[in-house]
Image (cartoon, helix red, strand yellow):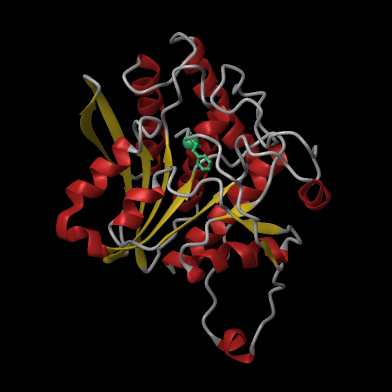
Amino acid sequence: MRRAALAAGAATAVAALLGTTTAAQATAPRTASAPDIPVAGIKAHLDKLQSIADANGGTRAHGQPGYKASVDYIKGKLDAAGFTTSIQEFTNGGATGYNLIADWPGGAEDSTVMVGSHLDSVDAGPGINDDGSGSAGILEVALAVAKEHLKPAKHLRFAWWGDEEDGMVGSGHYVDTLGADRSKISAYLNFDMIGSPNPGYFVYHYNDELAKVFTDWFGTKKIATEWDTEGDGRSDHAPFQRAGIPVGGLFSGADYIKTDAQAKNWGGTAGKAFDACYHRACDTSKNIDDTALHNHADAIANAVWQLSS
Ligand code: DPN
Ligand code: ZN
């Protein structure tokens, strides 16, 4: 969702925490660690989303045929992998919108871990970084859950939201219809833009425990992180937060400008936006940094494995 540029608060640098093993951890039952997420799989989904936009007037926006075609593509992959999927409909602006929900059978439903990304683009373009990247990234993580036959202690649910770009309409509708079930969601993790072409590594800092899962993982990979400030209140985590649900997430940057210090940490170009094609027609399958996409997807998989165990 776009808003006028904010006065950028000084981003807080996060000290990279190196993982150390305590005696207690060494003797605790080990949770199998998350697999490497194949970036080629994510890229194949992005190519498909690009071709869907190409076949539908260059967009996958709410109310456009390219949106529903995107839902059908993702749903087909999940159904084939053994997820229980459902489509939640809503209306906005005279058009039907769709949230795609996918449950991995098993795990304690009264402490459900939810992972979500918005699947709609803006009217102006195909929305491949925003937010094909998150949508394809969490799809590949979901497919890894199936491939590994993960048996999490907590229930796992993935969501692809409709109509985020008009003000988190789909996710807002979902949260509104949860009713008393909102207390069963122990965490919501949001991924809106994870392959920015001039990337940063921003961690949502609304909940210490959820933030630490990500900062610890990036720390072990020697990748510096900063707290996200650009995305505050602007994506699908906001309705969950308003409902009192703990939220976390990752973000690789939109139209804020990379500083010299950030370019030193992360490479890329100082003085240039993290994503110069944000909300533009040029947000195509070329508008992706593969390394950032891969790192973020592996971080998501780690969080899913850790938090659901
Ligand atoms: N991804 C942006 C959008 O959907 O328009 C919103 C956003 C911007 C989210 C900045 C996070 C950070
Ligand atoms: Zn977005």
Task: Give the total number of marks visible in the rendering.
Answer: 0
Image coordinates for residue 296, horizontal then vertical, percent: 61, 49
* Identity of the residue drawn at 43% across and 43% down: 235
Q: Residue furthest bottom?
A: 23
User: Viewed as shown, does residue 91 lie left or right of 207?
Assistant: left
* Identity of the residue drawn at 56% across and 37% down: 5
Q: Quadrant of residue 182?
A: bottom left
Image coordinates for residue 268, horizontal then vertical, percent: 79, 39
Image coordinates for residue 1, horizontal then vertical, percent: 44, 34
User: Viewed as shown, does residue 119 lie left or right of 267?
Assistant: left
Q: Nearer the viewer, residue 300 or 235?
A: 235
* Identity of the residue drawn at 65% across and 61% down: 12
- Rendered view: 129 above or below 28: above
Q: Residue furthest front?
A: 7
* Identity of the residue drawn at 68% across and 43% down: 292
Q: Nearer the viewer, residue 213 or 198?
A: 198
Image coordinates for residue 256, horizontal then vertical, percent: 64, 39
